[in-house]
Image: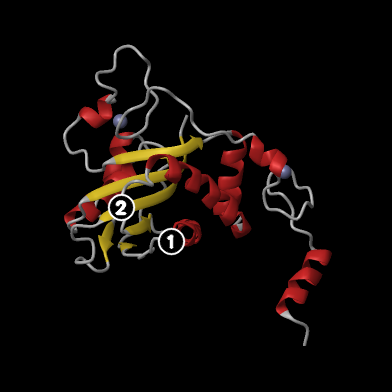
Amino acid sequence: MPEPGMISFLKGMIHPVMCAVCGRGCGQFLCPDCSSGILPIDINRCCWYCGTPLLSSGAREGICSSCREPGLNFTRHRSYTFYSGNMKRIIKKFKYSKIYGLDNALAGFLHKTYRKYFIRESIDYIETVPGEHTKKLTKKFSKIVKIPFKGNIIKIRDTRRQSGLDLGARKINILDAFKLRNCLIYRDKNILILDDVWTTGSTLKEICRVVRCGGARKVFLLTLARGA
Ligand SMILES: [Zn+2]
Ligand SMILES: [Zn+2]
């Protein structure tokens, strides 16, 4: 019986790992060339809470109009980059084509943003929006930062896809769609919730509401990309 290492080596000879963007059989799911074009959001002025880039004039104290409305229920959200180009391609490959070997590359982008904005927060648990691909990504990230992923947020009813709905319809679509498996473990804890894409934030804000109802002290949000 050959060793497991030998088996994967032989598999690699037959089906070499290809870059999910350019398709070159380079042995990596995302080659350095395709990765190097995915640049972090670098803005001087963004909303203190949700990270939306702000025009220098017209905004008060660096807080966007949406976050000035009552009911803000998270402490800070940041995305690694914008939802376009190669990042959009690899998120689609990861989510729809289930190329889960991209988990390492994607978790690496999250880690960069985590180190920049969240490392000084004492985060107790990592969570995510329920879904197969988000769970894979969160498990990988949780191992990198050595903070437990609890999987305590569950979806309790079907919802329509959010894309194509306007803001009001998105909020209604997602309302009361989630609950906590164990409603005691978040009490006085700081939670970091991950997701792939932030568009209007409706889903994440609804999850924050549920997590806050469970007694969480601070809720932070980290996504790969934000709608441009
Ligand atoms: Zn490539
Ligand atoms: Zn904001």
The quadrant of the picture occupied by the N terminus is bottom right
Going from N to C along the chain, the mark reached first, 2 or 1, is: 2
User: Residue 144, how many percent across, how many down?
Assistant: 49, 58
Q: Quadrant of residue 52?
A: top left
Image point 71% across, 78% down: which residue?
Answer: 4
Above or below 147: residue 226: above
Above or below 147: residue 172: above
Image point 51% across, 36% down: which residue?
Answer: 83
Left or right, 109 with reference to 97: left
Above or below 57: residue 173: below
Q: Which residue is label 1 attached to?
A: 146
Ligand 2's quadrant: top left
Which mark is drawn over residue 122? 2
Taking the view exactly as shown, the residue that stands out farthest to the bottom is 1
Residue 173 in view (yes/no)? no
Amino acid carrying mark 1 in the image: Lys
CA gap, disc 2 and disc 1: 12 Å
User: Residue 9, how many percent across, how many down?
Assistant: 78, 69
**Closer to the camera in the image, 210 or 224:** 224
Left or right, 171 with reference to 196: left
SS for dot 1? loop
SS for dot 2? loop
Image point 42% across, 49% down: which residue?
Answer: 195
Callout 2 crowding tier (Cα within 10 Å): few <14, some 14–19, many ≥20? few
User: Residue 211, how many percent across, how many down?
Assistant: 24, 55
Left or right, 103 with reference to 123: right
Left or right, 34 with reference to 225: right
Amino acid carrying mark 2 in the image: Ser
Q: Are marks 2 and 1 in contact (CB under 8 Å)?
A: no
Residue 138 in view (yes/no)? yes
